[in-house]
Amino acid sequence: MNYKNYKICIDACLACAALCNNCASSCLKEEDVKMMASCIQLDMECAALCYAAAQLMSLGSSRANSLCRICSEACEACAEECGKHDNDHCKACAEACRKCAEACKNMMKEF
């Protein structure tokens, strides 16, 4: 495997990680930060996994598929949590997470 084979998924993972980081940072500025704790935690976990998955795919690692499965699960959990909140940063994060989860699933099917 090489970068070209993974490009769509790498791009989705990097976009998702950036929006998850933005969401976590924005959630910390909400009035009721305690209410956002689960969202913040999932944002940070999802971002870390997205970055790691993108990195392994760009390296052509044989472990990329395994990490993409975990990344997809984290993205789905993050999207679900962010979907519970009515603010722009959570909505954008949820959408990016859904796209990333789908991209990871598609990548695993093809390769």
Image (cartoon, rainbow, N blue to C red):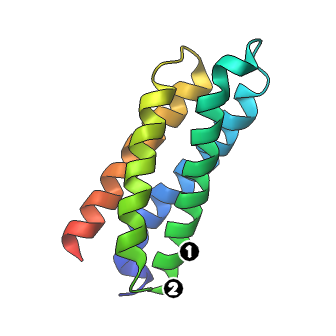
Is residue 58 left or right of 5 when viewed as pictured?
A: right
Would you identify the image quadrant in which residue 28 lies?
A: top right
Q: Is residue 89 above or below residue 66?
A: above
Q: Between 9 and 43, which is closer to the camera in this rendering?
A: 43
Q: Is residue 68 above or below residue 34?
A: below
The amino acid on which the numbered mark 1 sits, given as a three-letter code, is Gln
Is residue 94 left or right of 32 when viewed as pictured?
A: left
Q: CA distance from mark 2 to mark 1?
A: 6 Å
Look at 53% across and 36% down and name the residue there.
93
Q: Position of residue 88 (x, y in %)?
A: 59, 21
Q: Position of residue 77 (x, y in %)?
A: 43, 39
Q: Position of residue 48 (x, y in %)?
A: 61, 58
Res 27 label: none
Look at 44% across and 57% down and name the residue there.
71
Q: Is residue 84 above or below residue 3?
A: above
Which part of the image, by quadrant, shows the C terminus?
bottom left
Q: Is residue 67 above or below residue 90?
A: below
Asked if disc 2 and disc 1 are in contact, CB closer than 8 Å, the reply is yes
Is residue 39 left or right of 81 when viewed as pictured?
A: right
SS for callout 2: helix
- How many numbered callouts? 2
Residue placed under numbered mark 2 in the picture: 59
Would you identify the image quadrant in which residue 106 lies?
A: bottom left
Label 2 neighbour load within 10 Å: few <14, some 14-19, many 20+ = some
Residue placed under numbered mark 1 in the picture: 55
Q: Position of residue 1 (x, y in %)?
A: 35, 87
Look at 41% across and 59% down and name the residue there.
70
Look at 51% across and 69% down and name the residue there.
54
The amino acid on which the numbered mark 2 sits, given as a three-letter code, is Leu
